[in-house]
Amino acid sequence: MSSGGFSIKARGLGNNNNGGGGGTGTKCGRWNPTVEQVKLLTDLFKAGLRTPSTDQIQKISTELSFYGKIESKNVFYWFQNHKARERQKRRKISTHRQDTDLSRLHGDQPCRHQPPSKDILDVCEEEEKVIETLQLFPLSKVERVRANVSVTIHNEYIREQANATAFSTYSSCGAEMEHPPLDLRLSFL
Amino acid sequence: MSSGGFSIKARGLGNNNNGGGGGTGTKCGRWNPTVEQVKLLTDLFKAGLRTPSTDQIQKISTELSFYGKIESKNVFYWFQNHKARERQKRRKISTHRQDTDLSRLHGDQPCRHQPPSKDILDVCEEEEKVIETLQLFPLSKVERVRANVSVTIHNEYIREQANATAFSTYSSCGAEMEHPPLDLRLSFL
DNA sequence: GCAAATTAATGATTTATTCAAG
DNA sequence: CTTGAATAAATCATTAATTTGC
């Protein structure tokens, strides 16, 4: 809701058009993509393209100009916005607490031999399979070379654990609050 | 935020277990962080924490256990992985510098509707409190003081750069011609 | 049916962060 | 410590949808 919507355009009212001379026909409205253009862009996105290079933008733009007026920046912005909004959309759904089972907070089970956890950071984002391998198109030159992330497993951690001292932190509220605005929670350290 | 863009995963997200009621504890599957846990860890990372000490790991673990099952080693590994992957991600990108600089994309008049001149604002601001990047932690539970500090100045030049040059692109278009049908169209890249 | 009135989408800008080179 | 480069996040603003009173 909201999102600009209506209300008083207390912002950039009065000034429109480029100063210039009187009522030039500059028009200067915003890009209004045709269905074909959107279709193509969406297809590329679905195929995995997220942040096209300048070169790619150029090509896409040229190609799409066939379906209607368009500029490179429109393509750039489209990807920026689409990517962000998809992410935002997905983030909405995954905001729930998992469990509050306090019964066994310190169940530091050994369960060793456990390789380092994977980076689940992006879980919320690209829920889908944003396979970056997307080589559907001959993307520019260098695009290969992928993670060789081998995080060395330090025994260090185990050693340190021996010294570790447990202590209790206040356990914050137990209510189901909305996503706290922002980290007040960081104060526990 | 979670920078991101591409990620390698895309598989087996279906698993979960962990909490899940009375399951036998022998599962010993790998840690599956909740969104809250990831959020907190990410916040700490963004705040500057990179290699938490044993003590810190302990505290973080305890705090995060409120949101779901977790062990100290999970925290340790998370930081190791996250740090490494952020670095790697950055390195890869800068290696082949795909510039997305708008200055080159803007094929024409920015046609901007005069942004509000808010210069008046920044004049008298709290210039001080240049908080130490890494000492953010002992945050008091008081109020989160947002420090925009001198970043504004920094952005100044970026803005100029972004506004940059205007050159004209072909603004082809004009006629709506019929077009090739299918989606072999994606091959133009 | 049809415009004015409202709301929802989404294009375009600005602001904040991040890592790392200098 | 400062600054370059590249985004992602947040925000602003305009256009398309949709609703509403006639």
Image (spheres, coloured by chain):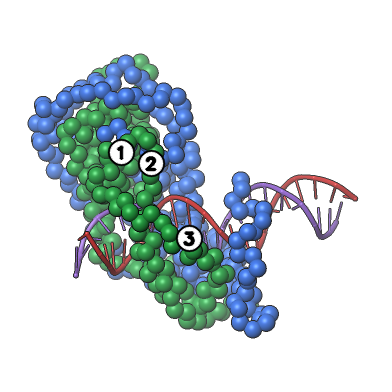
Chain colours: A blue, B green, C purple, D red
Image point (64%, 59%), residue name: A9
Taking the image as shown, residue B6 lies to the left or right of residue A90, namely left
Could you tell me if the residues under marks 2 and 1 are in contact, i.e. CB atoms within 8 Å? yes
* Disc 2 chain ID: B
The amino acid on which the numbered mark 3 sits, given as a three-letter code, is Leu
Q: What's the distance in space between the residues labelled 3 and 2, CA to CA?
A: 21 Å
The quarter of the displayed image where residue B57 is located = top left
**Whether residue B58 can be seen here:** yes
Q: Which residue is mark 2?
A: B144
Total marks drawn? Answer: 3
The amino acid on which the numbered mark 2 sits, given as a three-letter code, is Arg
Taking the image as shown, residue A6 lies to the left or right of residue B56, namely right
Q: Which residue is mark 1?
A: B139
Q: Are marks 2 and 1 on the same chain?
A: yes
* Disc 3 chain ID: B
Q: Earlier in the sequence, mark 3 or mark 2?
A: 3
Taking the image as shown, residue B131 lies to the left or right of residue D18, namely left
- Counting from the top left corner in percent of width and height, residue A39 is at 55, 60
Q: Is residue B60 above or below residue B101?
A: above
Image point (45%, 35%), residue name: A179
